[in-house]
């Protein structure tokens, strides 16, 4: 009985530690984003992004959809998408390009803060999310245009439900999101421990290792990378922050794992949400996976080429080192 009680006590302590670390980053970021949103930042960002829409074969109206997604969440982007294109639908190809870009770059203020806490430079993370998101949209647009794929109009499969507005409605929504995160992280921590005990985690890591090995990630980071890839940066990043504090994952694994999460994350929920808008799996999943794999090969090579000083300057923070030093 004592080992079981000890197991639960240690697990609850770990869950508490992970959530505290994550919310220390998320809560200030959420408040800042809300202030920017109220000040009209989405309109200003969309104005700046509008000229870029031509590069990816989209009308200027798509800029406000991507801007809202970048600043806030995919859910905001979905509402803006409906408002922008309910009367003038995009083709399925255009919708797939836009929704794929939304998957690369959404919630940047919050998620970049999370990845920075785990050890990634903010500018590098922004380039990965925004820059490669734009590149992915550009390549996907020309691929569809060259082969004349998915040129029919996008059927309207979804429209937003009216939500309670004002500060109270927003606060309640954020509290629900935080509760959801606590529940998911609790389930993840318990799930990973149980999988470790019964040996399933070892099997999953064994299956994942050949792919991760190609892009330079060792099996030490496999389970946390898998969480982030399937469920999202907030969850995978939260676990990686905890591992960074423990000093159990080396800098290269941390860097490459976070880079992969920036490129390819939340394959389940976010992909399904973008399919609801009319995006096609050829872009949302197949292209995104292949594109991310190729980019990761380049990033892994770049990491090996750069000196330690340049890595610290451009790619990774000294967060992990400072944590380890404090523990010593």
Image (cartoon, rainbow, N blue to C red):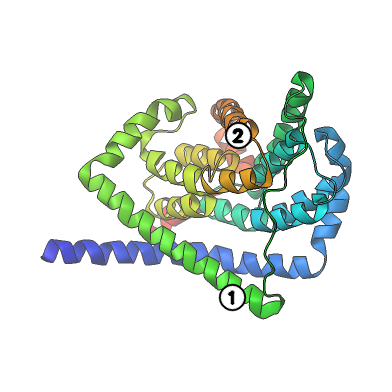
In depth, the one of 44 and 323 nearer the eye is: 44
In depth, the one of 248 and 125 nearer the eye is: 125
Which residue occupies 21% across, 61% down?
7
Q: Which quadrant holds residue 97?
A: top right
Decide: few, some or many residues near mark 1? Use Cα within 10 Å; few <14, some 14-19, many ≥20: few
User: Would you say 223 lies left or right of 155 here?
Assistant: left
Residue 57 rendering spot, x and y as whole percentages:
83, 34
The outermost residue toward the top is: 147
Q: How many marks?
A: 2
Would residue 73 be seen by someone viewing this image from the given angle?
no
Disc ID at residue 281: 2
Mark in front: 1 vs 2: 2
Would residue 163 be seen by someone viewing this image from the given angle?
yes
Secondary structure under badge 1? helix
Q: Classify the position of the N terminus by image quarter.
A: bottom left
User: Would you say 17 lies left or right of 294 here?
Assistant: left
In depth, the one of 325 and 293 nearer the eye is: 293
Label 1 and label 2: CA atoms lie apart by 33 Å
Which residue occupies 62% across, 75% down?
171
Disc ID at residue 121: none
Disc ID at residue 172: 1
Mark 1 or 2, nearer chain start: 1
Residue 273 rendering spot, x and y as whole percentages:
60, 49
Which residue occupies 53% across, 50% down?
233
Q: Classify the position of the C terminus by image quarter.
A: bottom left
User: Would you say 236 lies left or right of 168 here?
Assistant: left
Q: Is residue 51 above or below residue 307?
A: below
Residue 212 rendering spot, x and y as whole percentages:
44, 30
User: Would you say 149 lies left or right of 179 here?
Assistant: right
Is there CB contact under 8 Å for labels 1 and 2? no
């Amino acid at each position: 009985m004592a080992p079981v009680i000890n197991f639960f006590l240690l697990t609850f302590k770990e869950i508490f530690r992970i959530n505290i670390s994550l919310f220390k980053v998320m809560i200030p970021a959420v408040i800042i984003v809300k202030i920017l949103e109220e000040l009209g930042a989405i309109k200003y960002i969309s104005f700046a992004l509008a000229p870029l829409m031509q590069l990816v074969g989209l009308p200027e109206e798509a800029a406000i959809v991507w801007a809202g997604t970048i600043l806030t969440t995919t859910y905001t982007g979905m509402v803006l998408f409906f408002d922008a294109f309910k009367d003038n639908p995009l083709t399925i190809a255009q919708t797939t390009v836009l929704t794929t870009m939304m998957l690369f770059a959404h919630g940047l203020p919050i998620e970049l803060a999370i990845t920075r806490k785990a050890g990634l430079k903010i500018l590098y993370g922004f380039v990965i999310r925004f820059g490669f998101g734009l590149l992915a949209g550009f390549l996907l647009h020309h691929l569809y245009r060259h082969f004349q794929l998915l040129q029919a109009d996008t059927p309207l499969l979804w429209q937003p439900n009216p939500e309670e507005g004002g500060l109270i409605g927003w606060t309640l929504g954020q509290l629900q999101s935080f509760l959801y995160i606590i529940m998911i992280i609790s389930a993840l921590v318990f799930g990973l421990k149980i999988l470790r005990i019964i040996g399933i985690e070892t099997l999953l890591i064994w299956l994942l290792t050949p792919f991760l090995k190609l892009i330079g990630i060792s099996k030490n980071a496999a389970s946390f990378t898998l969480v982030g890839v399937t469920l999202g940066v907030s969850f995978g990043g939260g676990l990686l922050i905890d591992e960074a504090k423990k000093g159990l994952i080396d800098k290269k694994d941390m860097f490459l794992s976070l880079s992969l999460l920036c490129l390819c994350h939340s394959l389940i929920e976010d992909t399904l949400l973008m399919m609801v808008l009319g995006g096609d799996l050829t872009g949302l999943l197949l292209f995104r996976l292949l594109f991310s794999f190729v980019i990761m090969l380049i990033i892994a090579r770049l990491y090996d080429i750069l000196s330690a000083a340049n890595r610290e300057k451009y790619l990774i923070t000294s967060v992990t080192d400072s944590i380890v030093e404090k523990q010593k």
